[in-house]
Image (spheres, rainbow, N blue to C red):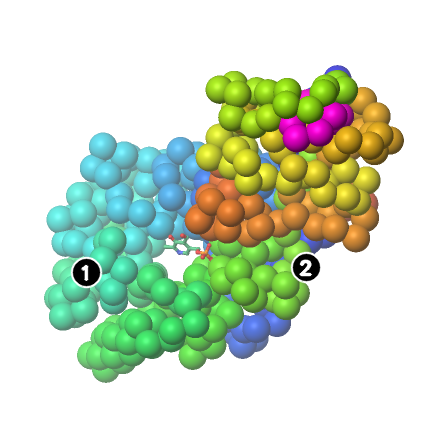
Amino acid sequence: MTRPTQGRISTNALRHNLRLIRSRLRKETRVMGVVKANCYGHEASICLPILCDAGIDIFGVATIGEAETLRQLGLDRRIVLLTTPFFSERSAFVTLDIEPLISDIETAQWLSATAEAAGKVLRAHIYIDTGMTRNGAKPEDAAHLTEKVASLPGLHIQGLSSHFATSESLDRSFALRQSATFDQVYRELCGTGWTFEDVHIANSGGILNFPEAHYTLVRPGLSLYGYHPLEELQATSGLEPVMSVKTAVSSLSKVPAKTSISYGRRYFTEHDSVIATLPIGYGDGIMRLLTGKLDVLIAGKPFPVVGTICMDEVMVNLGSNDSGTKVGEEVILIGRSGEMQITAWDIASRIGTIPYEITTAIANRLPRVIAEGSEEGVETELNHAQQGTIE
Ligand SMILES: Cc1ncc(COP(=O)(O)O)c(C=O)c1O
């Protein structure tokens, strides 16, 4: 039996978003699919085959565990670790064939030694900090680092990379500075004879706002999953949210005015009301912080979630008139119902966060299923290799 509380993944929307991203690129610019955090909560076993089928052959992850999952799903394409390598995880780079971002010589040395001992050569990307101040070598150290890495027998310099801090912002000034710094480093290194197959700095904001920073490879995450990194541009972006979150009414109760609802008695009905209970809560990733700030859609109409959000359930006030809602009726938390739509941006902005946090918070407890109407797309090469891994 399938729990009615589900994340529904539209493979058509995923394909559409990738097409839209590619339409912004020069023909020769390639796409790294950023699939960290289980594809931003969208389920790697569903998204990966779609992205592979669409021709993506480089994937970005944040942890060794994520890379391992991709390999277990049968992925035999390139994987880049987008965070700093840990010494304790060094052997995994070789066994799982993971490409590191290199910010310092010491890391390059122990990665090279590990690869060499296994008789392998790892592709590596020189990583420059142009203003994110998270990791990366200082621009003035780029030439020295590149020279040292090039001398290591276990590493092959595959790429030059950096990361934007404000590429989504309407204020373009800092991103332009980062882009100029990166470009200068790139030109200087090329000027001294170094070549890089993969030159990459652009995340979704960089792809959408800085065409001059596309270089040979871009790294979209959020936009693949249907969100523009700036809320104001979501509606006109043409991007389609990939995940809907839906549940169903589990029970209905008629209560008089001044009845308290849920833990802590933080909400009281004003009028006689019909209260619906839904089997979804903060244990599913609907944060308790959303208490008093969340709406749901039932039969194309919005209704407020009332009272404190519980771990496994929430209550909805259907109003004083009989809305005709029945037990078992579908309820949408993220997605479309009739003419109405709730996006992860709508939820995020109510609690001062971003859609990245909303979709990655959707818990594993919520099964991800392929949305109706897009099933035909999942018959892929990777699927056949991995029968039984896709729900
Ligand atoms: C290094 C790196 N590249 C690319 C991305 C993708 O960014 P976005 O989801 O904004 O497209 C991320 C995500 O945070 C990242 O950390």
Q: Residue at x 56, y 66 (%)?
A: 233
Regarding residue 39, the answer to whether it shows in the image is: no
In the displayed structure, would residue 305 be above or below residue 264? below
Q: Which mark is residue 6?
A: none
Q: Which mark is residue 16?
A: 2
Regarding residue 125, the answer to whether it shows in the image is: yes
Quadrant for ligand 1?
bottom left
Q: Secondary structure at mark 2?
A: helix
Q: Residue at x 43, y 79 (%)?
A: 212
In the displayed structure, would residue 217 be above or below residue 290? below
The tag earlier along the polypeptide, 2 or 1, is 2
Kindly indicate the quadrant of the structure image that contains residue 364: top right
Q: Residue at x 54, y 76 (%)?
A: 26
Q: Which mark is residue 137?
A: 1
In the rendered structure, the answer to whether residue 7 lies left or right of residue 282 reads right
Q: Viewer-proximal residue, 11 or 131?
A: 131
Tell me: is circle 2 under 8 Å from ligand 1: no
Q: Which residues are magenta?
A: 269-278
Q: Secondary structure at mark 1?
A: loop
Q: Position of residue 354 (x, y in %)?
A: 47, 50
